[in-house]
Amino acid sequence: MKINLIVVFLSLSLGKTFAQINESDISKFQIRASLTGNYQQGNVEVLNIKTKIDITVKPIKKFVFKTQNSSLYQSFYEKKADNDIFSRNYLYYNPEKKVYPFAIAYISSNYRRKIDHRYFVGGGATWQIINKENYVLKLSSSTVYETTKFKNTSYNDLEYDGSNTINTWRGTLYVGGWCYFLEKHLRFFYDAYWQPAFNNRNNYRNQLDLGADFPIYKGLSFNTVFAYTHENIVISNIKQNDKILTFGLSYNFKTK
């Protein structure tokens, strides 16, 4: 039987949530979960499955825990192209303030870049420049200690050749937010970060996400997201840049 294209999309949000969950929201619990995928068979065989879940919870007064988790699996003609996980976890203190501190723990893997695993831990502070119903803008900086284990020992920078593990201290500069236009018929959201290593100016990475939501009916929206990532230190013969454009449907449900 020939299957041309099957697309599966499920997105559910509880609490006052948007493309990003706002840790400064007064809600005690927020969750946003999504599942997207497609399967094509015939002239082209493609399987793509992507999941994402973001949660914030206030375990005790003045503290907020936020976790952002996602996975990506892709194959072409039964040959695996991606099999990645991503988990970023924060503990905030007094996030309703204009400036507030946080601790961060992060773990990920990247099949395409031949990264077996990467994790870092550290801390920093966020400056809540604007936090209004229709406009949010935040700037944060942090310092982290990072360990990355690769599946090879040959890099595009000879300094790291011979070892499959790179350990380094990094700084992070992050900006993110969203804003509404056309009487809330269009919402534009964005976030970007830059992470340089302290011991080598050539060891840095950056990422940019740009997206838009177009409301359709009572919380149902069409959305599109463009993501660009650059990693300056990579395994030999691995490209430094990745770009992806995705689009689909999302559904937001709010509770007070």
Image (cartoon, rainbow, N blue to C red):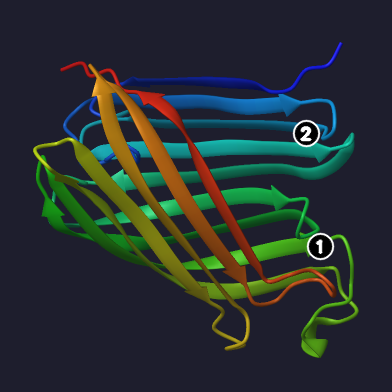
- Amino acid carrying mark 1 in the image: Phe
- 176, above or below 233, in the image: above
Q: How many marks?
A: 2
Report the disc number at residue 168: none
Residue at image coords 63%, 27%: 37
Visible residue check, residue 71: yes
Residue 102 in the image: state x and y as whole percent.
Answer: 34, 54
Please identify the quarter of the rendering in which residue 163 is found: bottom right
Task: For the residues labelled 1 and 2, say whether their Cβ atoms are less than 8 Å apart.
Answer: no
- Against 64, residue 128 (above or below) is below
Closer to us: 131 or 222: 222
**Residue, x 66% and y 27% (percent of image)?**
38
Q: Quadrant of the C terminus?
A: top left
Q: Give residue 150's mark.
A: 1
Position of residue 170 measured from the top left corner of the image (x, y, whole percent): 53, 73
| Residue position marked by numbered label 2 in the rendering | 46
> Quarter of the image containing the N terminus?
top right
Residue 118 coordinates in the image, percent (x, y): 68, 56
Q: Farthest residue to the top: give it.
A: 1
Rendered view: 251 above or below 66: above
For the residue pair 200 and 111, the one nearer the viewer reads as 111
Residue 176 quadrant: bottom left
Residue at image position (38%, 36%) is: 223
